[in-house]
Image (cartoon, grey):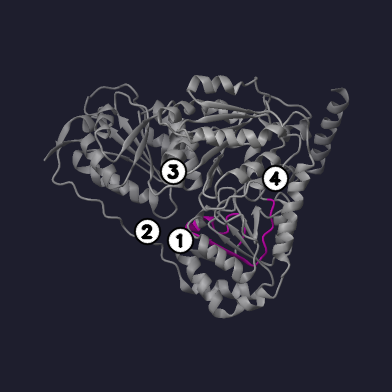
């Protein structure tokens, strides 16, 4: 039969259950856009910038069962989208990136958008493909999807040359997609070794990352059997319910909230699940896991990369945790743990309350106390609300002070840590979850990068709320500059008036200037969102108190300085303090 490459792309994407594509049409992909426009299952979404589109695709994958998919022009579309592709790559998020390509049969050099896209994307994708014939289109898409979703997930790139997507070619058949097995063989003997390690411990702690996102019931059961405190990574913030008595918060070292620092201080066995022990969740590698470390992950390269493990179990946590829980229950060791640390839950609750009270006591007139704001936001949000954070000071405020109750209901940029994530990711999350409350929290710096994607939300009639923590600085970095430099270079922003952006993008606007505005401001914003229209909320936030994360990371990094470097840094700061 004769089919254009575009028709084959549409068929393959429909077979794969793709619901949305994100991008901007160009001369190399218009035929594919035209085909998708006729699909009953797929909605092509026009974005204001491919970088925003890549974050939308990321959010689709994180908050739904569909894979986030991009449809972009070659060259500039690829470079614009690279930030979101890199984020998905380092965070382990599946994504399909479909790009047009030059006419591979024209015989001409220096064609429009002619570049080696594969060389550019190789470091930030699991694989790249260039379709060479009509017969290869469907099988390539199926293979790309399997690679993106199997093992540790990640983005996969497909280039569709103009002459294949736009012109007809012969294909023998159009096969349906049959999902191949995603299981990674794991050894039951390794679970036995883990049980032996747990038996040797007197107090077990659990550290869970995004790799445990689909394991909540088993995580809860394991924690309860072992009476173990549970900390998470930043990316895995939602994998364990924050309203559970054994939940302590993000991280476990001196950079973590007191509930976590105290609960993990005397553990002698750590079960790490679905985490790489990367820089952010370890507070710039500021933790010291016990020698009795059990590490479970689907990617064997993470084992012993930063911290040596006594026992490693390679495989999918959704398969390993049920077996581990069953072995713990059958071994009888749970009964001994039940009689230890009986006051742990009460201590965690007390430490959490004291930390919030500490923040509540730090008030600056005519500004918004971030803890008061986040506590009120939690009170007004439903349990299944999705929270999206950008990269910045507000990220760690949310991690420390905004409890998340359901798995995969908090998303943010993590290891790649790209600013500008929040607004487009909020759009993607709301598109994938139209019946849920979806709110974004972004700094003014991050909003300046991709805030115009609010227009995309307006065009799609999405009632998402964007809370801008507006302090006039790139505060996470400006705070880091204060101690060693006693000055702020290129971190003070020009004045932003979000109300003007709201008018320009067709969004509703709410202003929260001080603590007295918090309750009514949040209520108004959530009410506006029910009208299927985005809402921009200006929050005049007070950043004069530092998060535990910032304090801890600064101390950790200072410890790494040599004595001479410490003297230099302190002397410079003191001199500048005196001289101005």
- The residue lying toward the viewer, choosing from 568 and 52, is 52
Q: Which residue is mark 3?
A: 433
Q: Residue at x 60, y 51 (%)?
A: 233
Front-most of 158 and 535? 535
Mark 1, secondary structure of its residue: loop
Q: In the image, is residue 256 above or below residue 221?
A: above
Whether the residues at callouts 3 and 2 have beta carbons within 8 Å, the answer is no
Mark 4 vs mark 3, CA separation in Å? 31 Å
From the top left corner, tell me how far across and down residue 467 is, in percent. 59, 33
x, y percent for residue 536: 55, 29
* Rendered view: 174 above or below 191: above
Cβ–Cβ under 8 Å for marks 2 and 1:
yes
Q: Are marks 3 and 1 in contact (CB under 8 Å)?
A: no
Was residue 290 drawn as part of the magenta stretch in this picture? Answer: yes
Question: What count of labels does the image hold?
Answer: 4
Judge by depth and name the residue closer to the eye, 308 or 448: 448
- Contact (Cβ within 8 Å) of mark 4 with mark 3: no
Return the disc, 4 or 2, that comes first in the chain's sequence.
2
Magenta stretch: dominant secondary structure: loop
Dot 1 crowding, Cα within 10 Å, few <14, some 14–19, many 20+: many
Q: Nearer the viewer, mark 3 or mark 1?
A: 3
Q: Tell whether position 120 is magenta.
A: no
Q: Quadrant of the N terminus?
A: top left
Which residue corresponds to mark 4? 549
Residue 42, percent from left and from top: 30, 38
- Outermost right residue: 578
Instruction: Determine the image quadrant of residue 114.
Output: top left
* Tag 2 residue: 182
Residue range corresponding to the magenta coloring: 286-308
Question: Which residue position is annotated with label 1?
Answer: 316
Q: Nearer the viewer, mark 4 or mark 3?
A: 3
């Amino acid at each position: 039969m004769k089919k254009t490459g575009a028709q084959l792309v549409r068929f393959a994407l429909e077979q794969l259950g793709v619901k949305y594509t994100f991008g901007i049409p160009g001369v190399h992909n218009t035929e594919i856009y035209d085909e998708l426009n006729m699909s009953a299952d797929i909605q092509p979404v026009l974005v204001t910038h491919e970088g925003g589109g890549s974050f939308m695709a990321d959010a689709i994958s994180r908050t739904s069962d569909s894979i986030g998919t991009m449809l972009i022009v070659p060259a500039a579309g690829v470079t614009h989208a690279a930030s979101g592709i890199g984020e998905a790559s380092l965070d382990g998020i599946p994504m399909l990136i479909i790009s047009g390509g030059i006419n591979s049969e024209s015989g001409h050099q220096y064609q429009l958008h002619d570049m080696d896209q594969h060389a550019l994307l190789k470091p930030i994708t699991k694989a790249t493909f260039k379709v060479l014939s009509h017969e290869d289109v469907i099988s390539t898409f199926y293979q790309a999807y399997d690679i993106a979703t199997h093992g540790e997930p990640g983005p996969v790139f497909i280039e569709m040359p103009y002459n294949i997507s736009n012109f007809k070619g012969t294909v023998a058949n159009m096969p349906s997609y049959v999902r191949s097995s995603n299981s990674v063989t794991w050894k039951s003997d390794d679970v036995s070794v883990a049980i032996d390690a747990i038996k040797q411990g007197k107090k077990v702690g659990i550290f869970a990352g995004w790799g445990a996102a689909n394991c909540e019931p088993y995580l809860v059961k394991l924690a309860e059997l072992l009476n173990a405190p549970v900390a998470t990574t930043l990316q895995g913030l939602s994998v364990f319910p924050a309203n559970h008595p054994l939940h302590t918060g993000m991280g476990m070292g001196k950079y973590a909230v007191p509930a976590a620092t105290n609960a993990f201080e005397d553990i002698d066995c750590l079960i790490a699940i679905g985490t790489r022990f990367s820089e952010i969740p370890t507070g710039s590698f500021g933790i010291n896991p016990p020698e009795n470390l059990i590490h479970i992950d689907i990617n064997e390269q993470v084992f012993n990369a930063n911290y040596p493990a006594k026992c490693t179990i390679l495989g999918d946590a959704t398969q390993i945790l049920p077996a581990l829980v069953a072995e713990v229950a059958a071994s009888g060791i749970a009964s001994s743990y039940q009689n230890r640390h009986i006051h742990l839950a009460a201590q965690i609750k007390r430490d959490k309350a004291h930390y919030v009270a500490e923040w509540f006591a730090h008030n600056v007139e005519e500004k918004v106390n971030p803890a008061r704001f986040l506590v009120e936001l939690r009170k007004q949000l439903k349990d299944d609300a999705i929270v999206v954070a950008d990269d910045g000071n507000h990220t760690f405020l949310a991690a420390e002070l905004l409890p998340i109750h359901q798995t995969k209901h908090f998303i943010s940029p993590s290891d790649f840590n790209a600013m500008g994530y929040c607004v487009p990711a909020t759009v993607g999350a709301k598109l994938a979850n139209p019946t849920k409350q979806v709110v974004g929290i972004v700094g003014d710096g991050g909003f300046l990068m991709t805030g115009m994607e609010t227009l995309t939300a307006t065009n799609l009639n999405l009632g998402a709320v964007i809370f801008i923590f507006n302090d006039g600085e790139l505060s996470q970095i400006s705070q880091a500059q204060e101690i060693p430099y006693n000055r702020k270079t290129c971190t003070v922003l020009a004045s932003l008036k979000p109300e003007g952006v709201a008018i320009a993008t067709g969004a509703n606007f709410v202003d929260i200037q001080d603590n007295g505005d918090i309750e009514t401001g949040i209520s108004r914003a959530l009410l506006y969102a029910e009208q299927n229209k985005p809402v921009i909320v200006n929050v005049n936030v007070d950043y004069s108190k530092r998060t535990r994360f910032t304090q801890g990371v600064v101390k950790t990094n200072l410890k790494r300085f040599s004595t001479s470097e410490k003297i230099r840094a302190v002397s410079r700061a003191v001199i500048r303090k005196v001289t101005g």
